[in-house]
Structures are given as C-alpha cells and as structure tokens.
Image: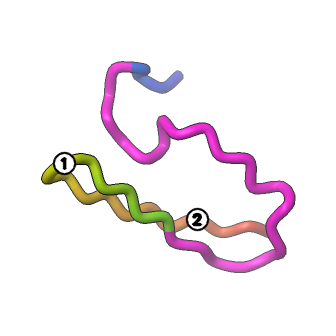
Amino acid sequence: MEDVNSSTASDYNIHLSHLPCGMYFLKVTDGELNITEKFIVK
C-alpha cells in the first residue's frame, strides 16, 4: 500500500501498457523538488 500523502513520482497514475518495451525515465519537478523515476516496460 502506498502512502497517499507522500510526495513521490510513484503517486502519479501513469498507464504504461501502451508503451513499447524499453527503459524510460520520468522527471517530475515540484517547486524545488526534482524527482527522477526510472522504469522498465517489458
């Protein structure tokens, strides 16, 4: 279970099933906070 109140890129609801296989990087900028998430679509 994820903490809804936490501020991380994983809280964003992203549907990845339509993407081709590969490695992706998601950068989220929230004020002074920069978050980079790496995820792999198989």
Identity of the residue drawn at 65% across and 69% down: 40
Q: Is residue 4 above or below residue 15?
A: above
Front-lying residue, 15 or 31 = 31
Examine the rendered structure and indicate whether residue 33 appears above or below residue 41: above
Mark 1: few/some/many CA within 10 Å (<14, 14-19, 20+):
few
| Region in magenta | 5-25
**Label 2 belongs to which residue?**
39
| Residue 13 in picture, x, y percent from top left | 61, 38
Q: Quadrant of residue 22?
A: bottom right
- Reading the image, the residue beneath label 1 is 31
Q: Amino acid at mark 2?
A: Phe
Q: Is residue 38 left or right of residue 29?
A: right
Mark 1 secondary-structure assignment: loop
Dot label at residue 10: none
Task: Specify whether residue 19 is painted magenta.
Answer: yes
Left/right of residue 42 with respect to residue 35 in the rendered view: right
Residue most extreme to the bottom: 22
The x, y position of residue 6, in whole percent, is 32, 28
Dividing the image into 4 quarters, which one contains the C terminus?
bottom right
Residue type at numbered disc 1: Gly
Q: Position of residue 32 (x, y in %)?
A: 13, 53
Disc 2 on helix, strand or loop?
A: strand
Please report the residue visible at 48 percent of the width from the left and 43 percent of the height from the top. 10
Judge depth for marks 2 and 1 and give the one in front: 1
Q: Is residue 6 magenta?
A: yes
Q: Looking at the image, which residue is at 48% across and 26% down?
A: 2
Among numbered discs 2 and 1, the one appearing first in the sequence: 1
